[in-house]
Amino acid sequence: MADHDVQFLKATTQSMGLLLSDAQLDQLVGYVDLLEKWNRTYNLTAIRNRQEMLRRHVLESLAVLPFIRGSRRLDVGTGAGIPGIPLAIADNDSRYTLVDSNGKKTRFLAEVKRQLGLTTIQIQTERIESWTPDCVYDVVLTRAFADLITTLNRVDHVLGNEGCLYTMTTDSVAAVRTTMPDTMRLGEAHEIRVPGQDWSFNLMKIQRCHGEAL
């Protein structure tokens, strides 16, 4: 099973333009192993099928990597580590902080960090709106977290003046533009489709206008 998963991830990530080492591929499979195991007891994700975990959790996360810029990265509402864990495995040059208010999920993430030796991640059990970090972030990542206005309000204090919010969403570009506050702008939008899937999602890069606060 593990060898099949490694070959599947290797072939698919290569077709996406990502070149991962054998060690990174093994870590990604190890992450799915742990997710499957813990999910039986702790209900970390509604996805139960292993192949779907590989596609929806691992590959969809990795698909956004080429579009993200910034070394200090924050994954808000990370849940079972999506997209932060796959990104941290594939990207050794950036540091990732994973925040979630659910203690059972952050305990799982701590075990993933320990077993896979992920030294570039930090884990925080916090509600993002009440968390006071030591720094602001170049990159704030969200996936199915909240509506745009709620998200912007909750992450304002952790997003640097020149930082960017990258949101993985099924909302259309037009819908996001109509809800954008005057102090923010949509910098980029990319339709992301993982090879072998018949659906897509949008990755939207949202920035402050002229460094203004919300």
Image (cartoon, grey):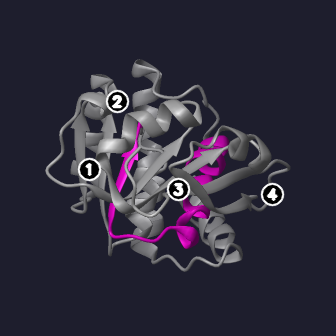
Q: Quadrant of residue 138?
A: bottom left
For label 1, the residue is: 113
Res. 102 mark: none
The kind of secondary structure element at disc 1 is helix
> As rendered, which of 9 and 66 lies closer to the eye?
66
Residue at label 3?
2
Circle 4: residue type: Gly
Compared with residue 164, is residue 48 higher up or lower down, i.e. above or below? above
| Mark 4 burial class by Cα count in 10 Å: few <14, some 14-19, many 20+ | few
Q: Nearer the viewer, mark 3 or mark 1?
A: 1
Q: CA distance from mark 3 to mark 1?
A: 19 Å
* Figure check: 76 above or below 107: below
Disc 3 residue type (three-letter): Ala
Work out whether mark 2 precedes mark 4 in sequence or the reverse, and give the earlier one: 2
Q: Is residue 206 left or right of residue 160?
A: right
Q: Earlier in the sequence, mark 3 or mark 1?
A: 3
Residue named by callout 2: 105
Residue carrying label 4: 196
Per the image, label 2 sits on a secondary structure element best described as helix
* Spatial separation of the CA atoms under disc 2 and disc 4: 29 Å
Q: Earlier in the sequence, mark 4 or mark 1?
A: 1
Q: Is 64 included in the stretch rendered in magenta?
A: yes
> For the residue labelled by badge 4, is the local secondary structure a helix, a strand or a loop?
loop
> Which residue is found at the position 49% from the left and 44% from the top?
142
Give the amino acid type for the residue marked by disc 1 in the picture: Lys
Residue depicted at x 57% and y 69%: 67
Q: CA distance from mark 2 to mark 3?
A: 24 Å
